[in-house]
Image (cartoon, rainbow, N blue to C red):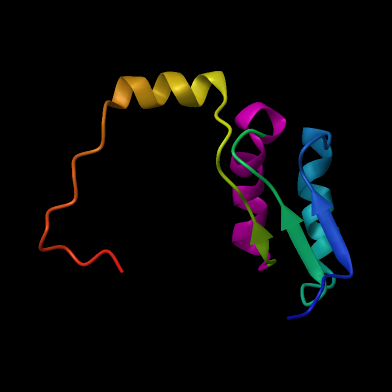
């Protein structure tokens, strides 16, 4: 396992600076890493990262567990997920 020489955290970054920060991290993609989560920037960090990451291959870590109000409303509106049929391999 290697460790990153540059970690870009997206929890409290200025949204207007996010794309530039990804470009700067991409200058050393072997040593860069981005940390994000669905609730960062009030649920917008991953969406804002998507276009920049489409152009630059940088490792990303994300996590789950905390839902924004918007995510909760969307989940309730979507309803429960159907069960996985017993003959479907989930491994």
State the image coordinates of residue 3 (x, y, percent, origin top left): 82, 74
**Measured from the top left, where is residue 83 in percent x and y?**
18, 44
Q: Residue furthest front?
A: 86
Q: Residue at x 30, y 26 (%)?
A: 78
The x and y percentages for residue 32 are 80, 67
| Magenta: main secondary structure | helix
**Residue visible at 27% across and 64% down?**
90
Q: How many marks?
A: 0
Highlighted magenta segment, given as a residue range: 40-57
Is residue 75 found left or right of 84 in the rendered image? right
Q: Residue at x 16, y 63 (%)?
A: 88
Asked if residue 44 lies in the magenta stretch, the reply is yes
Q: Nearer the viewer, residue 48 or 89?
A: 89
Residue 58 located left or right of residue 32: left
Q: In this view, which residue lies farthest toward the right?
A: 5
Location of residue 16 with respect to 74 vertically, above or below: below
Picture quadrant where residue 39 is located: top right
Q: In what quadrant of the picture does the N terminus appear?
A: bottom right
Q: Residue 21: horizontal and vertical position, in percent?
A: 83, 51
Q: Quadrant of residue 91?
A: bottom left
Q: Is residue 3 above or below residue 13?
A: below
Q: Residue at x 70, y 66 (%)?
A: 58
């Amino acid at each position: 396992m290697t460790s990153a020489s540059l970690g870009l955290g997206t929890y409290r970054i200025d949204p207007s600076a996010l794309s530039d920060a990804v470009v700067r991290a991409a200058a050393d993609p072997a040593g860069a890493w981005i940390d994000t989560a669905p609730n960062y920037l009030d649920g917008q960090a991953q969406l804002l990262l998507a276009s920049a990451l489409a152009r630059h291959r940088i490792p990303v870590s994300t996590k789950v567990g905390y839902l924004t109000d918007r995510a909760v409303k969307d989940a309730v509106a979507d309803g429960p997920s159907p069960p996985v049929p017993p003959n479907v391999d989930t491994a």
